[in-house]
Image (cartoon, coloured by chain):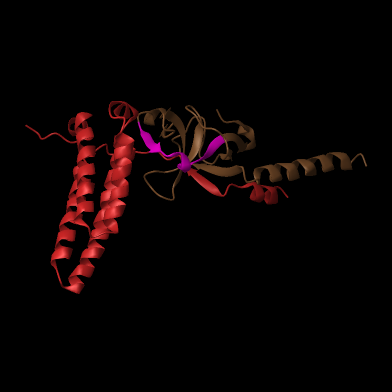
Chain colours: A red, B brown
Amino acid sequence: MLNSVLRALAPRTTANAHCDIPCGVYDPVQARVEAESCYKIIQKYNDSADELFRTRCIAVKEERAELTKHHIDVMWHDYFKPEHVEKFPDLHDVCWKASKQASQVKRTTDIAEAQKLLDLIDKIDMMWRETGGPTTTRLQASA
Amino acid sequence: MRRLGPLLGAAFLVVGLTGFVSSRRVMRVAVSGHSMEPGLLDGDWLLVDRGARVGVGDVVIARDPREPGRVIIKRVLHAGTDAQLVLASDHPAHADETIGPVLPPDILGRARFRYWPPSRLGVIR
């Protein structure tokens, strides 16, 4: 009887309380490189008449845009802290728009949309620099 | 009839408790891991209030913003004016690690009560 009751009361969801060990290395350049790939691929797509090549362009662009989105989200969720939001009140808005823009680039071949994504990543880069990111999150070159 | 009294009482208690923890507002979760020690231990079973208001200091269940599909249990460290939360572990070795911002739709509820093991039955603080 006790086993039946326990089975009925057993949780169906596991909540992870595992220790998180982030490496602490953050740099928007990861997002920038993937977004530049999207930009260049859209250029090549629009310049080509080869249908097979254009199909490959679409597939690779979607993959790169997804990586861009991932790197933006890592900056947003893991690097930026409440004190950074105090310094840049539009921080959440910029990151949110950049993440959405990466999704937009995934579904378009409009080069202007890829440029908008680069501009938003540059804003994130500026906030990363202004909050000391280059010195606190990257390994410094040995003398 | 005297013998039936305690049995009926226990039966009502079991049925009542089962009904309560099975309601839609309450979610049952099992803790996995050690980052919420010493308050919550690996294997604890908790009742989570899905409709509760959540604020700084509350233990919450949330979708992990870094990994879709993963559910985490953490304590609210900071609440922004836009209702976005920053979460942290209780374990002293991980006090400087934060997760967030977590958006309000990704907060699944507030952990209220530990119902297993019986030796550690009690309210979550």
**Left or right: A14 in relation to B47:** left
Q: Position of residue A100 (x, y in %)?
A: 32, 48
Q: How many marks?
A: 0
Of residues A121 and B39, the one drawn nearer to the viewer in this rendering: A121
Of residues A44 and B67, the one drawn nearer to the viewer in this rendering: A44
Taking the spot 27% from the left edge, 39% from the top edge, the residue there is: A23
Name the quadrant containing residue B83: top left
**Does the segment drawn in magenta span residue A88?**
no
Of residues A48 and A70, the one drawn nearer to the viewer in this rendering: A48
Q: Where is A106 relative to A116, above or below?
A: below
Q: Is residue A22 visible?
A: no
Q: Is residue A36 visible?
A: yes
Extreme bottom residue here? Answer: A51
Of residues B96 and B102, the one drawn nearer to the viewer in this rendering: B102
**Does the segment drawn in magenta span residue B101?**
yes
**Left or right: A61 in relation to B38:** left
Name the quadrant containing residue A97: top left
Extreme right residue here? Answer: B1
Taking the spot 23% from the left edge, 52% from the top edge, the residue there is: A113
Q: Which residues are magenta?
A: B97-111
Extreme left residue here? Answer: A143
**Left or right: B98 in relation to A34:** right
Q: What main secondary structure does the magenta stretch of the protein show?
A: strand
Taking the spot 40% from the left edge, 50% from the top edge, the residue there is: B68
Q: Position of residue A111 (x, y in %)?
A: 19, 55
Q: Position of residue B73 (x, y in %)?
A: 48, 38
Taking the spot 18% from the left edge, 31% from the top edge, the residue there is: A135
**Left or right: B38 in relation to A28:** right
